[in-house]
Image (cartoon, helix red, strand yellow):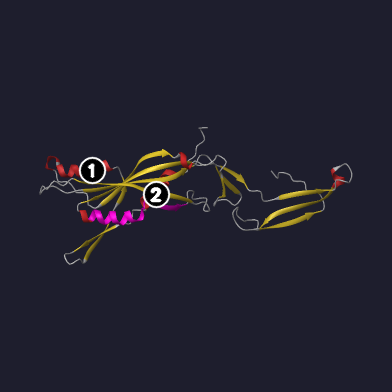
Amino acid sequence: MFGQWFYHKRVRTAVSVFGSMFNNLYVLRHDSTGKTISQVKVPLSYAPKRNFIARLDEMKAGEDGERRVAIKLPRMSFEITNMVYDATRQLPKTNNISAGVTDSVTARRKLYTSTPYTISFQLNIYAKSQDDALQLVEQILPYFAPQYTLTIKPFSDIPTLTEDVPVTLSGVTFQDDFEGAVEQRRTIIYTLEFEMKISLYGPDSSKTIIRDVRNNLFNMNAGFADSDMYIKTLKTVPNPLSVGADSDYGFTETQFGHPLILQDSS
């Protein structure tokens, strides 16, 4: 079972797709009259929450009186927190997928039944004011009721294959460490918990597409030898010859009045 190398980058794709949902969020700043004075794009990175908290605590402590560069807020981070098998979505072992690939018009790729997994993500929002934090929270929550479905192409070389990926918001928690000290830098953290349902694929196989079919027609009432019964050969090929496996095409049929001896030219 093991020993055959394969890597479809399914988890890597899931991380990229999840992050892409939140990489274009902004916070607006207003003056006392309500006029917008600035628009700040909120940076997003893949990093554990504890790393950001440790960095923020380090800046607050100011070890040895050293001057430290503060992390600019608001910002966001996300990470994978768990992966678990989802037996409720398991399909029969005979539910395979066959499709043409972009880099070849003579081959077809076969994917065997996938294994369903649920990936848990944690999205953290860091801000120094409630207004900044709530602007981001309210730009996210309305899209999850509680589920938002993405349509992705799981394999870059199989453009015809698409997959619906549900992303569910399972919870929101809030943390504010401000205690009122004048010298203390306030940090507000909103943590959003998500679950993404993906499918993982094992090794696949590639088969050559049949492009030349030849049928020998015989008269069974003729003599005993094949040469006595032989009538003709029908050759069928796709039209055009360079057509892909999943394209719309016709056929060209050619008749021969004598046997065709097919030999390996090599």
10 up-or-down from 33: above or below: above
Residue interval drawn in magenta: 132-152
| Place of residue 179 in the rendered image (x, y in percent of width and height, measured from the top left) | 13, 46
Helix, strand or loop status at disc 2:
strand
Magenta residue check for 144: yes
The residue under the point 61% across, 44% down is 207
Q: What residue lies at 35% left-to-right and 44% top-to-bottom?
A: 121
Report the disc number at residue 53.
Answer: 1
Say whether residue 43 is left or right of residue 213: left
**The one of 239 and 78 positioned closer to us in this rendering:** 78
Q: Position of residue 41 (x, y in %)?
A: 28, 57
Any part of residue 27 in sight: yes
Residue 113 or residue 90, whichever sits in front = 90
Q: Is 207 on the left or on the right of 141, as rendered?
A: right
Question: Disc 2 marks which residue?
Answer: 167
> Which is closer to the viewer, label 2 or label 1?
2
Does residue 9 appear in the picture of this structure? no
